[in-house]
């Protein structure tokens, strides 16, 4: 009797054991866009269980159920990346089993701003947000620059773009794409536009047709041949494009273009002598400038009273020079050439003298004896040259005679000395 009671009690106890459901599989894996099956197994009892899809413990869905003999089958989808890590709970009575969803999807890139203004010379880094499962590696990622190879311009990883010293050549569109086992980043490559800002700078030589000398940094003194034209150049580049302003105290025979930066003299007269031109280019907080003082003049005056005299082997050339009306165009130098007076002869000697000199001496020992030579003397300034000429004749013999062809030969003197020496020897 006692045994029967115990058996009955055991049977009653066994019948009251809870039925614990099982999620199969525990990790539900699928690609984005796919529909997955979630199965809750409750044994050989026809279940009245519920499958709950949760997000932060909030029940999301309990429909699409297929209740079978020992399980509930739930179809869910299509999957989206936001389903990654979502919990699945299978509940039977007071008992629960849980699992989770893993969604495989290609990389998706995003960043707050796709356009970036960067100051030239700075270090710069862009970090992208990447959603992916699995996450891409550096080796699975490709960056391009303006549609072509990135080269060695920057350092990159699967989600960073880094410049250590960015310059204006780095301006352009950078694109990134990654391919993992889940696919290639979609829908298209992710683009970032880098716009490198740099200060204004002048892009060309300061002048054409004028001779300009830099007196201080970006300040020039220029000379222009009277009656001729010329151009001063203040063309600039910068990012953003600079604003250019040109001011001049000359209004006649001059044109100013604030777009191209060109200041053009059409036919210079003395009215433009001493003209000033100031160019200023500004972008942001940076300003650069060029300034010019323009002198109008002509080539130098001609040397006068040019004479050439020879004494022994030394030629002396002397002259006078005056150019009082051309004071703003200083004389650079005098130059000379010596050549035989015969037609088509080549220059045998040449050289220069300073602008304050009024004579020069030349050793002409190597010239042909008893030969007439032309000496051409030129005055030179930045706008041209003028010439005057004279002639001289080398002496006979060894070129050691006096002025203008007078001859005193060493050979005669040597003969006399030898005769005297011989007489002394004989007397001894």
Image: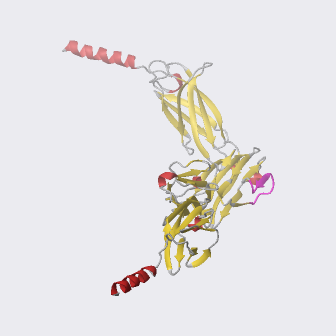
- Give whichever of 119, 333 is nearer the camera: 119
Q: Residue at x 59, y 54 (%)?
A: 175
In the displayed structure, 412 sits above or below 333; it is above
**Residue positioned most to the right:** 252
In the displayed structure, 395 sits above or below 250; it is above
Q: Position of residue 149 (x, y in %)?
A: 56, 47
Look at the image and say whether residue 253 sits in the magenta stretch: yes
- Give whichever of 120, 84 is nearer the camera: 84
Q: Position of residue 152 (x, y in %)?
A: 50, 50
Location of residue 376 by image quarter: top right
**Residue positioned most to the top:** 426
Residue numbers of the magenta segment: 247-259
Q: Residue at x 64, y 51 (%)?
A: 203
- Give whichever of 59, 257 is nearer the camera: 59
Location of residue 114 by image quarter: bottom right
Asked if residue 331 shows in the view, the reply is: yes
- Total numbered badges shown on the rendered structure: 0
Asked if residue 122 shows in the view, the reply is: no
Tell me the colour scheme of the image: secondary structure
Where's the C terminus, which quadrant? Answer: top left
**Left or right of 223 in this view: 392:** left
Where's the N terminus, which quadrant? Answer: bottom left
Q: Position of residue 30 (x, y in %)?
A: 55, 60
Location of residue 82 by image quarter: bottom right
**Residue positioned most to the left:** 428
Look at the image and say whether residue 132 sits in the magenta stretch: no
Q: Position of residue 318 (x, y in %)?
A: 56, 36
In the displayed structure, 173 sits above or below 378; it is below
In the displayed structure, 6 sits above or below 70; it is below
């Amino acid at each position: 009797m006692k045994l029967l009671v115990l058996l009955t009690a055991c049977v009653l106890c066994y019948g009251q054991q809870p039925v614990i459901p099982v999620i199969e599989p525990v990790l539900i894996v699928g690609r984005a866009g796919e529909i997955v099956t979630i199965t809750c197994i409750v044994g050989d009892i026809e279940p009245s269980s519920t499958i709950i899809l949760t997000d932060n413990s909030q029940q999301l869905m309990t429909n699409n159920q297929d209740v079978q003999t020992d399980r509930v089958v739930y179809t869910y989808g299509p999957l989206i990346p936001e389903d990654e890590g979502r919990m699945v709970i299978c509940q039977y009575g007071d008992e629960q089993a849980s699992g989770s969803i893993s969604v495989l999807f290609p990389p998706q890139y995003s960043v707050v701003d796709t356009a970036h203004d960067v100051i030239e010379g700075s270090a710069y880094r862009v970090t992208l947000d990447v959603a992916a499962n699995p996450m891409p590696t550096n080796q699975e990622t490709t960056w391009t620059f303006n549609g072509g190879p990135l080269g060695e311009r920057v350092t990159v990883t699967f989600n960073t773009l880094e410049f250590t010293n960015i310059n204006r050549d780095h301006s352009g569109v950078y694109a990134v794409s990654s391919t993992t086992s889940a696919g290639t980043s979609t829908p298209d490559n992710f683009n970032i536009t880098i716009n490198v800002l740099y200060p204004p700078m002048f892009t060309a030589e300061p002048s054409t047709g004028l001779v300009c000398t830099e007196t201080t940094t970006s300040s020039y003194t220029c000379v222009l041949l009277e009656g001729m034209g010329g151009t001063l150049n203040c063309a600039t580049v910068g990012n953003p494009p600079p604003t250019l302003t040109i001011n001049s105290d000359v209004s006649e025979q001059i044109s100013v273009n604030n777009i191209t930066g060109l200041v053009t003299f059409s036919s210079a007269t003395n009215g433009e002598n001493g003209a000033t031109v100031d160019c200023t280019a500004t972008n942001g907080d940076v300003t650069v400038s060029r300034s010019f003082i323009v002198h109008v003049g002509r080539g130098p005056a001609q040397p006068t009273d040019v004479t050439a005299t020879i004494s022994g082997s030394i030629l002396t050339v002397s002259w006078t020079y005056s150019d009082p009306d051309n004071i703003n165009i200083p004389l650079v130098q005098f130059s000379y050439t010596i050549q035989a007076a015969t037609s088509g002869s080549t220059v045998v000697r040449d050289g220069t003298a300073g602008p304050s000199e009024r004579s020069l001496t030349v050793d002409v020992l190597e010239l042909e004896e008893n030969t007439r030579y032309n000496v051409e003397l030129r005055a030179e300034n930045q706008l041209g040259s003028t010439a005057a000429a004279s002639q001289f004749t080398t002496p006979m013999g060894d070129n050691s005679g006096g002025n203008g062809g007078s001859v005193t030969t060493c050979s005669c003197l040597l003969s006399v000395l030898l005769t005297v020496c011989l007489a002394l020897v004989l007397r001894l």
